[in-house]
Image: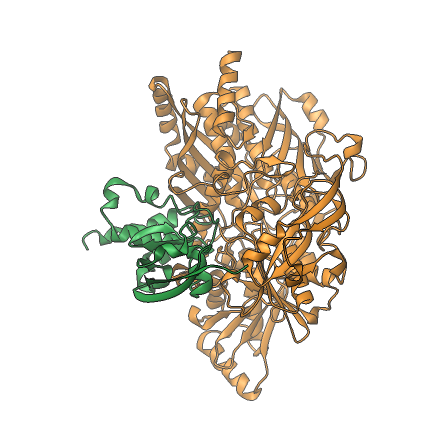
Chain colours: A green, B orange
């Protein structure tokens, strides 16, 4: 059976991309298996675990729930955009253990950091509740999101 | 020291098996039995698919034995005829397209002539349900100390109780996955696993290959928790069979629904207690029966049962103990290893029962424990004399002081008397966990570790211990660096590859840091000895390594050490007497709950975990182990219910099987009491499984405290809590 494909253009981690996407493929499939960006993980395939979290126009989404063609002309940012300096505190607090949920956790954390006004209405525990982690018990992640005690002035 | 692979994981650069660039390859899929018990009478392929595009493997394609080599050869790699559980693998398919192979697997019909299945391990099987011996018994074990019947007859009080726990799904975030290919006559298997040497031994048996034609390589593993202890063997063989038949590289990655439905879970349990107590509130007799649902094949059930019964009487001193353990064969999907390995089930029952007994006697649960906690010089149920200098009462008192136990209980009484619908309670559990293989298990494993001096003076550690998030690479680096006087950056950890690393035993049983770490410590010393001085370290060692390589160009400078049992450890396997473990970790956990009488939802509002674990090697990693284990335990106690139909998970999705999110749990307060263990590396004891043992009983005891009911079954879902409260209301 021939697959219908569609050519789309979008911005991926700041650079323009053109891709032929299968209509049946999810954004997660496009990233992992077509564009060679396997950082985002499939934990459940139904939007429960958050391991596939990427930013779509600045908002965290489960890339397993987004049809690939829907990112046409939009901006996608994945965990591949993250550099070591971005995650230094999370490394100290033990925010990662096995690493399978981690790409999604980090992308949600980056969104919270970029939108500090969220913390006026929600706790970090509420904001992180869309990312399941089976290793850390979440304290390492939550602690990694909060500034260290001596950094309050900065 | 920071986690070695931490930056790679936090920036999404770690490559799990499904992330590897394998070039052109096929995707594999499994066709499974639609029935829990019977005989395969036909396999029908849909006419809608061109099957010539597919590689198809069934039991006839297995070159070696059609068994998954483990304790007993009862489980087939692919069912040939007899079906013993729903989702049992029957046929394998491979195709270049992942979508095509997954669709095709649904187009193969396995026709099964049904037989009467047996599911409820608590009820004796009907004659037509018997599939093993007279009564489906997989294994029976017994521990005897003193004369229980006489002690019960003489006891001032005898208190009974029955406790049950449900299955638990591991929910490692990376599902089971494996890749295989054939290269220069060597079948190579690479994937997600805890135990490369288990996989290589099982593959050797089923594929009929010699070890030099078979290579197993560990890929970074996205969580295991026991779920990747024995299960990966069958998936590895499946993937290799497809690779051998197709001549291509094959990858098999389970989708979440398949992983949850078809792979192992924590054994469901039922535990009966009959406890004798004297006039002073001291234990005089513990008569315990532990029954586990083993599922359809033996897997590791006898060993899980062993650990369950050894921990069943808890960390208490009692002169007369009888513990009978039974694992029962059913037609459920086989149960298997899960962090804690039977001890969480038996200690849930024991710690819950301690509170029930205390309440019957009119004693405070804390006071009852204070009178009975094991002291140095006392012995466990197997007669192992404890003399490690650990202050078990001190551990409990630290937990009580830190949490203001007395003050908070008083505040709860006031709160509960006045609040219209919320009830608060505090629950305590004091417990222990033995590290390493049981009894003579470590002697039989005879684990080995090698350390190699590299030409540039750095060293490489070669072991089969696998990183699955617990931090073994980091801890091994620390141990080697400290012993050798090296900066951590000059210690390299080899990828576990059965063509390169010695067999260090499986990565299980809280044994990696304590047991394998100690062997590593010895191997470091052996490297110095090879160079003429066991005390060589730092710059002198580096210079000696470089000089050796100058004299022996192209040669390998390797030193190896193997397991040495700690002195005085003797175990009688026939009678289950003696030193079951080299060391126990001791703990006291306190949980606070708030129950909403409108919804009967139980919320854990505070949790304190105090434990004595020898010397803490890496505070961040150790704390993470405890916090993560506690939250898995909170899930098992409150949320995680495997709803079974025909012996398999019906709620096999993360939408329907609820594990804790960050919003469901409080911060977990972790305190370590350090009491270095002389036989552990740098004084360390094992900690990985300990935190699974305490949360469920602490939470159940807290619910009992909040509501004045006695929970005896977990998970404590709102439905179960409602039943308990309404029963009390009706009876009262």
Q: Residue at x 63, y 28 (%)?
A: B273
Give the image location of residue B415, x and y in percent: 34, 22
Camera-nearest residue between B541 and A146: A146
From the viewer's perspective, is B490 left or right of B192?
left
Give the image location of residue B438, x and y in percent: 65, 49
Decide: is B391 above or below A63. Answer: above
Task: Give residue A1's quadrant in the image.
Answer: bottom right
From the viewer's perspective, is B234 left or right of B701?
right
Give the image location of residue B43, x and y in percent: 73, 50
Give the image location of residue B627, x and y in percent: 44, 46
From the viewer's perspective, is B533 left or right of B293?
left
Camera-nearest residue between A32 and B44: B44
Camera-nearest residue between B506 and B148: B506
Decide: is B143 above or below B177. Answer: above
Q: Residue at x 43, y 46 (%)?
A: A47
Asked if one can make out residue B566 in the rendered structure from this viewpoint, the answer is no
């Amino acid at each position: 059976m021939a697959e219908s494909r569609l050519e789309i253009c979008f911005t991926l981690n700041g650079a323009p991309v053109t891709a032929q996407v299968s209509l049946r493929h999810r954004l997660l499939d496009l990233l992992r298996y077509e564009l060679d960006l396997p950082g985002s993980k499939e934990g459940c395939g139904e939007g429960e675990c958050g391991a596939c979290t990427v930013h779509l126009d600045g908002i965290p989404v489960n890339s397993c729930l987004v049809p690939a063609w829907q990112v046409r002309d939009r901006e996608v940012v994945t965990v591949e955009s993250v550099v070591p300096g971005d995650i230094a505190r999370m490394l100290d607090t033990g925010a990662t253990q096995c690493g399978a949920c981690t790409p999604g956790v980090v992308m949600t954390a980056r969104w919270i950091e970029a939108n500090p006004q969220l913390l006026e209405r929600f706790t970090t525990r509420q904001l992180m509740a869309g990312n399941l982690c089976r290793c850390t018990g979440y304290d390492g992640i939550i602690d990694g999101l909060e500034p260290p005690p001596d950094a309050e002035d900065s | 020291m920071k986690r070695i692979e931490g930056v790679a994981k936090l920036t999404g650069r770690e490559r799990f098996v499904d992330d590897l660039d394998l070039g052109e390859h096929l995707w594999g899929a499994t066709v499974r039995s639609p029935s829990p018990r019977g005989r395969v009478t036909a396999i029908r392929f849909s006419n809608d698919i061109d099957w010539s595009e597919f590689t198809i493997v069934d039991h006839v394609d297995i070159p070696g034995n059609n068994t998954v080599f483990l304790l007993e050869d009862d489980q087939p790699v692919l069912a040939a005829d007899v079906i013993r559980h729903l989702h049992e693998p029957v046929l394998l398919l491979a195709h270049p397209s992942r979508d095509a192979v997954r669709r095709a697997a649904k187009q193969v019909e396995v026709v099964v002539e049904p037989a009467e299945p047996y599911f409820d391990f608590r009820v004796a099987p009907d004659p037509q349900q018997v599939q093993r011996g007279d009564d489906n018994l997989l294994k029976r074990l017994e521990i005897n100390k003193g004369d229980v019947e006489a002690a019960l007859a003489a006891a001032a009080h005898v208190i009974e109780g029955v406790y049950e726990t449900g299955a638990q799904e591991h929910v490692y975030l990376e599902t089971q996955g494996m890749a295989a290919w054939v290269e220069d006559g060597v079948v190579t298997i690479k994937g997600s696993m805890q135990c490369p040497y288990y996989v290589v031994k099982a593959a050797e048996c089923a594929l009929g290959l010699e070890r030099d034609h078979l290579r197993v390589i560990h890929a970074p593993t996205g969580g295991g928790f026991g779920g990747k202890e024995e299960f990966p063997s069958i998936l590895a063989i499946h993937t290799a069979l497809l690779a051998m038949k197709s001549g291509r590289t094959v990858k098999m990655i389970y989708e979440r629904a398949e992983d949850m439905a078809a792979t192992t879970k924590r054994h469901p349990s039922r535990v009966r207690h009959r406890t004798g107590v004297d006039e002073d509130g001291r234990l005089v007799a513990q008569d315990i029966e532990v029954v586990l649902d083993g599922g359809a094949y033996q897997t590791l059930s006898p060993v899980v049962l062993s650990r369950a019964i050894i921990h069943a009487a808890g960390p208490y001193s009692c002169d007369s103990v009888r513990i009978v353990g039974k694992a029962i064969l059913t037609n459920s999907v086989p149960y298997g290893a899960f962090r804690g390995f039977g001890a969480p089930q038996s200690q849930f029952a024991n710690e819950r029962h301690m509170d029930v007994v205390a309440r019957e006697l009119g004693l405070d649960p804390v006071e009852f424990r204070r009178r009975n906690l094991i002291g140095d010089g006392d012995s466990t149920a197997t007669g192992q004399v404890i003399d490690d200098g650990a202050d078990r009462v001190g551990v409990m008192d630290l937990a009580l002081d830190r949490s203001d136990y007395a003050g908070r209980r008083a505040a709860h009484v006031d709160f509960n008397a006045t609040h219209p619908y919320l009830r608060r309670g505090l629950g305590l559990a004091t417990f222990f966990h033995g590290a390493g293989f049981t009894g003579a298990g470590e002697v039989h494993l005879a684990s080995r570790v090698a350390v190699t001096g590299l030409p540039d003076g750095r060293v490489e550690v070669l072991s089969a211990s696998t990183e699955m998030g617990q931090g073994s690479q980091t801890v091994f680096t620390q141990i080697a660096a400290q012993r050798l006087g090296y900066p951590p950056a000059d210690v390299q950890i080899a990828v576990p590859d059965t063509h390169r690393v010695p067999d260090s035993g499986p990565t299980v049983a809280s044994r990696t840091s304590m047991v394998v770490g100690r062997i590593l410590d010895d191997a470091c010393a052996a490297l110095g000895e090879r160079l003429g001085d066991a005390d060589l370290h730092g710059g002198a060692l580096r210079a000696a390594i470089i000089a050796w390589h100058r004299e022996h160009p192209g040669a390998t400078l390797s030193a190896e050490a193997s397991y040495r049992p700690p002195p005085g450890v003797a175990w009688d396997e026939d009678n289950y007497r003696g030193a079951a473990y080299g060391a126990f970790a001791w703990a006291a956990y306190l949980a606070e709950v708030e129950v909403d009488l409108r919804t009967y939802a139980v919320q854990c509002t505070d949790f304190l975990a105090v434990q004595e674990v020898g010397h803490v090697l890496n505070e961040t990693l150790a704390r993470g182990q405890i916090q993560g284990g506690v939250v898995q335990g909170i899930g098992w106690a409150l949320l995680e219910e495997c709803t079974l139909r025909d012996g398999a998970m019906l709620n096999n999705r993360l939408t329907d099987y609820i594990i804790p999110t960050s919003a469901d749990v409080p911060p977990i307060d972790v305190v370590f009491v350090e009491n270095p263990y002389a036989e552990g590396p740098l004084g360390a004891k094992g900690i990985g499984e300990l935190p699974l043992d305490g949360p469920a009983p602490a939470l159940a005891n807290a619910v009992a405290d909040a509501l004045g009911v006695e929970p005896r079954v977990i998970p404590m879902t709102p439905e179960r809590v409602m039943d308990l409260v309404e029963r009390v209301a009706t009876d009262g």
